[in-house]
Image (cartoon, rainbow, N blue to C red):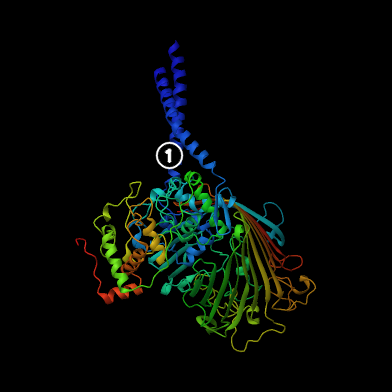
Amino acid sequence: MRMPKQSRLCGISLCFHSALTTALVLIFLVLSGSQRANALPAFARKYGLRCSACHETWPILNNFGLKFRDNGYQIMNDHDAPIWQNPGYWPVTFRITPIWHRVSAVSDVDTYQNVGATLPFGTTALQRITTTGFDLSGLDFHTGGTLEKNISFYVLPSSDPTAAFHFETVMGRFDNLFGSPWLNIKMGRFELNNLLSEKRMVGLTGNGGIYQTYHFIPQADGNIFGQMGDNQLGMEYVGHSYDDRTRISAALLSSADGNVNLTFGNAYSGFFTFDQGVDMGKLGVDRLGFYAFVGQASTYFRTSGGAPIAGSGLGNKGFSRVGFTGQFYFGPHFDVNVVTQHGNDNAWFGQGYGNAIATDGNGGVTCTGPQLTPGCPPNNTPGTVLPAGAQAPIWNGVTVESRYVYSPQLIFIAVYEAERMSQQANGAGCATSLACFGTNGTYTNGQSTSNLGNINNYDFIIRYNPFMTNRAGMALQSEFNIFHQIGTGATSPITGVNTNLNSSELLLGLDFDF
Amino acid sequence: MRRNWMKWSLWVVAVVVLSLPVASWAQLTTQDIAARDNMEAHVGNLTGHANSGQAKYDYRRYCVGCHGDLGDGNGEVAQWLDPPMWPKPRDFQLGIFKCRSTPTGTLPTDQDLYDAISRGFDRSAMPIWNVFTKQQRVDLVAFVKHFSPRFVSEKPGTPIQIPPEPEVTADRVKNGREIFARVQCWKCHGVTGQANGPSASTLQDDLGRPIAAFNFTEGARPKCGSTDQDIYRIFMTGLDGTPMPSFADNIKPDEAWDLVFYLRTLMAQPSKEKDIARQLGLKPVSPNP
């Protein structure tokens, strides 16, 4: 009679001990496993450095990371050439981010007569549509490193969330020519030498994942070629001092916004930067610089059957983007990064000319019909004249990104961006938007409001790296974005005027690379 | 069943008892290091503090991966560095440093440590940290020092005196060659400076890890600096913790300059000394004179 009870007691004890042992073993395995992942991000793996050595938070570069990049992905310790690496070393890292997000924006939606009706009632109303769900970012395969001492490469095949691939970055570079850090050349498709790098930003939301200042295009403007956030095709000279305090660059680019296959015409642009780091003692190394993006792009394409011919661009017109850059450290935990912009497009661009081919952004062409086919931008064919009152669109913008680095593993980021039109392509004589602006892209009296297209963008990020080794990178990210643009929202069914675009996005993501 | 329970309990007790000394040692080490938190460093008119937030932050961000939380050279990366190609990270607790301006066996000056951080170490995983502000580097010097009790109980050595560099002549280069043979530099560095001397393959550091002699011919920078003064300093102070001894007792200061000139003839970089050696038709020293 006692046996069952005794057995039961012993069973509980054994179960407890077994469970405890199993838990301890599991904890041990998990902890030891997390310290010894068998692959690692390409450069950390090569040099045995933690990701925090080069990144303020991965993938944002700190000053040491900037110097590493400026030296052609070398730390200049005579072990940079691949001959020093284990033969099994393969410099590949991939990055993808599973996310959950909540997107909210106002649309002009059909209204229904009653519940169960299958057809619209015939009217529409502005309504906010909010969608939540799990999602994916695109996938990046980073591979880069040295082919030989001072000869390096970077190749980045990248896909959108549906696995449609393109080459985001492809370049070869020659560094420290004649033993001088002032002589470095690269050629291919690459990110412009922006001090505040868009390709290394941590924002993942639709509007927080880009810098608006780097992509701003006035409403109905056809110049897609001045987007300094897009990787561009060309050749770049970079020079820097031995300690990387002084940096200078000059790039000659095809005016193609990075599109391959000579889609546009014989037009080039130049991107020039200079920045100087200053030793601010306990504050850190602060930087101040400027950039200028000036160039020309085609506005007229030869046609065949009325459809523009890719690569036949003529009628080059000018554009410019100039501004200051600043990177200000206030001790080890807080820094503020600023980019300003003064933008100017030729009046022809302001009227929508420039991208008559209507590329899809990756070398493909979406406009194959004759001119004025719906969806096809206008073409500045001979005899075309500018409408009365047309003028060069001019604007100013600023991006302010503040970072509080509690520790290398936990960072808080706040981004504010403002884009302000100072001269509209169609003049600014209207008292109200209703008076001068009809449906999207249609100017009822030839003029638009002075603030049409203005942007306010806010992005807030908390990013936590639960572990930090040189083996792999992982971050848990929460982000909230608010985007506001004047006059580019849904058209009001009552007034016929475009409303302001107000959208927001909440995102929780698991950002990792390996 | 009860016996099983007792067996399990004994195992748990045994593990706990055995782990106590380890835990106590780690605790003592941590407390010991923390007691030196007020360590200072002085370079020029700058003063660095080990207990400054900047020093702790920078060490944790940039250094801890190799040198470890306790400065013992056992960071998570250390296991992936295979000497002699990739030397293991320095154990700061030992207070033994290769690159010094002070005599062998003594502590380096704060300036020596500052220079090491700023210069980095070629042919190792230690980068050039000259992107830091000067204040950051001096703070890090203080932080590095606070790991070792030697910096509390001992003063740094007095930097050796380096006489002014004489004019290089053919006689001096030839004399340098004789010194190279006399003090048997070739045993490790090889007669042509290719690090292939008869002892090269047997070299170990003080901790018994393989270490490579410096190869003069492949264009690399010497670890402790590449100026003539740096090279002079290297063999007159020695690289503590390595088989490279100090020759301060074997070579007179004037002779030391002759040796510097001869070593320049072995290096890949073009130099006046190489031109002279070429004109003289200088042959490598003979291992069997």
Amino acid, disc 1: Leu
Question: Splitting the image into 4 quarters, where does residue B174 fall?
Answer: bottom left
Along the viewing direction, whichever of A244 and A422 lies nearer the viewer:
A244
Task: Please rate how many residues cluster around mark 1, counting C-alpha atoms within 10 Å: few if below 14, some from 14 to 19, many from 20.
Answer: few
Along the viewing direction, whichever of A272 and A371 lies nearer the viewer:
A272
As drawn, is A410 to the left or to the right of B211?
right
Tell me, yes or no, if residue B80 can be seen here.
yes
Tell which residue pokes out farthest to the top in this image.
Answer: A1
As drawn, is A383 to the left or to the right of A240?
right
Give the chain of mark 1.
A
Residue B224 percent across, percent down from the top left: 41, 60
**Quarter of the image containing the C terminus of chain A?**
bottom left
As drawn, is A165 to the left or to the right of A374?
left
Along the viewing direction, whichever of B87 and B169 lies nearer the viewer:
B169
Q: Is residue B77 above or below residue A367?
A: above
Residue A509 percent across, percent down from the top left: 56, 51
Along the viewing direction, whichever of A148 and A141 lies nearer the viewer:
A148
Tell which residue pokes out farthest to the left in this image.
Answer: B288
**Quarter of the image containing the N terminus of chain A?**
top left
Residue B161 percent across, percent down from the top left: 43, 60
Tell which residue pokes out farthest to the bottom in this image.
Answer: A383
The residue shown at (57%, 85%) is A315
Number of marks present in the image shown: 1
Tell me, yes or no, if residue B70 can be seen here.
no
Tell which residue pokes out farthest to the right in this image.
Answer: A431
Question: Splitting the image into 4 quarters, where does residue A440 fall?
Answer: bottom right
Does dot 1 land on a helix, a strand or a loop?
A: helix
Residue A28 percent across, percent down from the top left: 44, 37
Q: Is residue A326 above or below residue A424?
A: above
Question: Splitting the image into 4 quarters, where does residue A21 fall?
Answer: top left
Pointer 1 residue: A29
